[in-house]
Amino acid sequence: MSKIANKQMICEVLMEAAKTDKDIVALCSDSRGSGSFTPFADTYPEQFVETGIAEQNLVSISAGLAKCGKKAYAVSPACFLSTRSYEQAKVDVAYSNTNVKLIGISGGVSYGALGMSHHSAQDIAAMAAIPNMRVYIPSDHLQTKELVKALLKDEKPAYIRVGRNAVDPVYEEGNVPFEMDKATVVCEGTDVAIIACGEMVKPAKDAAEILKEQGISATVLDMYCVKPLDKDAVVKAAENAKAVITVEEASPFGGLGSMVSQVVGSECPRKVINMSLPDAPVITGTSKEVFDYYGLNAEGIAQKAAELVK
């Protein structure tokens, strides 16, 4: 199956919807190219706003348009959208309950070689800490398509983080199980539960195959809905396992691992191990090189799971 970047799929879904819905507006902070939104800007110039490198303006203008009845999609690099415009996201979008979808592109370590200034390891924790702000991290372009289609139907604030490059699909065309705000069970097992989000879902799925060859049965949950977290799915997976592993392209603090640990600790105590980026400036390199270095790959996840179970 061909690989498509999640950000490209977001543009494609919005372009299709914009054919009949003139209230859809896309906004970029000098990021139409990197965000794959040049086709939208060229096709619907009257439904596109370029703010330039001004992320605070990007978010506030989006909120203003939403108050006028528009459906605003603000596209900007996650590293800047989640920091430079944090107050606007908190006040103008979440507190004011405006119909703004914040699209954080090139999230995590997508800008690998550019270093810590362009990494967004903190955005999951930061955005999730804002009351009334939902946080979604789809795993592949097929799930991204379903997510954006669902978001077009509601008027609530949300932060969607996607990577920069095309990634191997987790699902198959025509067979994409999706329910809004419900984790997707990729596979079921009885020894260990692996709960992952975003680009970490594919290596988690591959790790389950490696573990199967070792006689270890693994559940894999695609927790694309980091907030609201699907607590029922977490509890069910944990209850049927000896231990739980969370995997995320993020800081070890305040993200998926922290949220899952809170649920497991209070509802069905099990040992929980969080696999994440380190609490330190990440090495420079491509996403794959960074993931391999820190063991955020199929082999690393499988090794950690085997150690836990044995």
Image: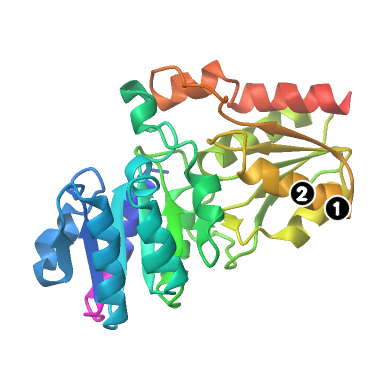
Mark pair 2, 1: CA separation: 6 Å
Q: Which residues are magenta?
A: 14-23
Residue 17 highlighted magenta (yes or no) = yes
Q: Quadrant of the N terminus?
A: top left
> Element at badge 2?
helix
What is the basis of the colouring in this image? Answer: rainbow
Residue kind at label 1, given as amino acid type? Ser
Q: Residue at x 48, y 36 (%)?
A: 121
Number of residue marks: 2
Q: Residue at x 36, y 23 (%)?
A: 115
> Element at badge 1?
helix
To which quarter of the image does residue 177 belong? bottom right
Q: Residue at x 47, y 21 (%)?
A: 282
Query: Residue 250 placed where, x, y %?
Result: 54, 36
Residue indicated by mark 1: 266
Residue indicated by mark 2: 262
Verify CB contact (< 8 Å) between mark 2 and mark 1: yes
Q: Is residue 44 left or right of residue 68?
A: left
Q: Are there few (<14), some (14-19), or many (20+) residues within 10 Å of tag 1?
A: few
Say above or below: 6 vs 215: below
Viewer-nearest residue: 57 or 298: 57
Residue 295 in view of the camera? yes
Say above or below: 234 vs 211: below
Q: Is residue 162 left or right of residue 133?
A: left
Q: Residue at x 60, y 44 (%)?
A: 255
Query: Residue 118 placed where, x, y %?
Result: 34, 32
Q: Are there few (<14), some (14-19), or many (20+) residues within 10 Å of tag 2?
A: few
Query: Residue 86 placed where, x, y %?
Result: 39, 52
Q: Quadrant of the C terminus?
A: top right
Viewer-nearest residue: 182 or 143: 182
Residue kind at label 2, given as amino acid type? Gln
Q: Is residue 177 left or right of residue 136?
A: right
